[in-house]
């Protein structure tokens, strides 16, 4: 009988981009990725499809499943076929890879009938993401926000969660998503490291609880260093957002918005074209379906 596992993990947006200095923070949002993993009796053969974006290569699928099977010494026993489906746009800075890695790792653990704690599952996904070349730092901050929700502040180099904040307000999150893709693997890391001192200061600000201001400032300095127009974020702030900034290495811009100002921010962004996505802060953990 086929052994099948299904799981869901969630999206996130950047508060502190860790690429410059290894210190990061992210906010979980309720966009989601589902993964279905079917074990096969062909050891070493791992394939799959990204149903929501079939043009993307399934390299991450293969690497994460291989990491999980290796962890449980099952590489010589099973292969797998995996399908993922997501409403998170790929390569826009919305943590699509972290959400996929979490969902795939969790579904694979379920398919083999094993148990693992949350951080072990996150780390299998992070390792698989590094193997697949879809991340610079391992994106531990993004992975933790995707898995746990809320605001998660981390040390990515040591893979430590430093603090989790649960925002009291139920703000909405609007995301301006241009049609352009920007792959993390092609980012100019050397240029981003020029601002490592400034980003460390913003990380301390977030750790002390001032994460909304840190998010805006992080977005502004990364926009400057990467050559993006910060006017989209400024327009969101002028329309009533409490925070707005570039998410990841872009090109998406996220805004945290009180519910009574969503219409104003939406109207301010319509002139920029692209897609405007509407999400909420996610407070749910990734889980098996």
Image: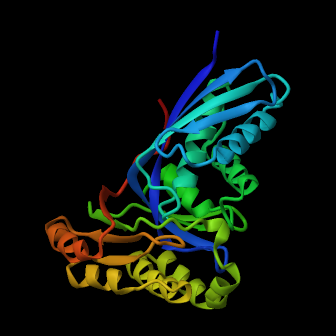
How is this picture coloured? rainbow
Q: Position of residue 208 (x, y in %)?
A: 48, 78
Q: Residue furthest toward the front?
A: 55
Please name the residue shown 49% across and 72% down the image.
Answer: 250
Residue 137: image quadrant is bottom right
* Res. 155 in view: no
Residue 77: image quadrant is top right
In the rendered image, the vertical position of residue 146 relative to residue 51, given as above or below: below
In the rendered image, the vertical position of residue 82 relative to residue 255, given as above or below: above
Please name the residue shown 21% across and 78% down the image.
Answer: 240
Q: Position of residue 87 (x, y in %)?
A: 40, 48
Q: Which residue occupies the foreground of this view, 258 or 165?
A: 258
Q: Is residue 55 left or right of residue 3?
A: left
Q: Position of residue 7 (x, y in %)?
A: 51, 34
Q: Is residue 23 left or right of residue 218?
A: right
Image quarter in which the N terminus is found: top right
Count of picture labels: 0
Q: Is residue 229 left or right of residue 118?
A: left
Residue 219: image quadrant is bottom left
* Res. 277 in view: yes
Q: Residue furthest toward the top?
A: 1
Q: Position of residue 187 (x, y in %)?
A: 64, 74
Q: Which residue occupies the foreground of this view, 139 or 163?
A: 139
Q: Which residue occupies the foreground of this view, 217 or 134?
A: 134
Please name the residue shown 41% across and 65% down the image.
Answer: 179
In the rendered image, the vertical position of residue 32 relative to residue 134, given as above or below: above
In the rendered image, the vertical position of residue 109 relative to residue 50, given as above or below: above
């Amino acid at each position: 009988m086929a052994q099948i596992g299904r799981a869901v993990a969630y999206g996130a947006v950047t508060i502190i981009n860790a690429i410059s200095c290894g210190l990061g923070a992210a906010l979980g949002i309720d966009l989601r990725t589902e993964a279905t993993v079917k074990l096969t009796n062909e050891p070493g053969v791992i394939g799959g499809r990204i149903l929501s974006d079939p043009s993307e290569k399934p390299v991450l699928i293969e690497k994460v499943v291989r990491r999980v099977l290796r962890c449980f010494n099952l590489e010589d026993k099973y292969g797998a076929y995996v399908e993922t489906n997501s409403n998170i746009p790929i390569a826009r800075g919305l943590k699509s890879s972290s959400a996929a890695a979490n969902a795939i790792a969790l579904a694979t653990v379920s398919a083999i009938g094993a148990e693992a704690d949350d951080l072990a599952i996150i780390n299998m996904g992070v390792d698989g993401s590094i193997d697949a070349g879809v991340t610079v730092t391992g994106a531990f901050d993004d992975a933790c926000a995707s898995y746990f929700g809320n605001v998660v502040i981390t040390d990515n180099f040591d893979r430590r969660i430093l603090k989790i904040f649960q925002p009291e307000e139920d703000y909405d999150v609007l995301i301006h998503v241009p049609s352009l893709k920007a792959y993390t693997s092609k980012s100019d890391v050397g240029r981003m490291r020029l601002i490592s001192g400034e980003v460390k200061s913003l990380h301390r600000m977030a750790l002390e609880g001032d994460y909304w201001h840190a998010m805006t400032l992080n977005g502004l300095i990364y926009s400057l260093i990467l050559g993006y127009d910060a006017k989209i974020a400024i327009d969101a702030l002028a329309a009533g957002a409490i925070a707005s900034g570039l998410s990841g290495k872009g090109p998406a811009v996220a805004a945290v918005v009180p519910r009574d100002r969503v219409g104003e921010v939406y109207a301010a962004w319509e002139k920029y074209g692209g897609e405007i996505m509407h999400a909420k802060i996610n407070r749910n953990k990734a889980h098996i379906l």
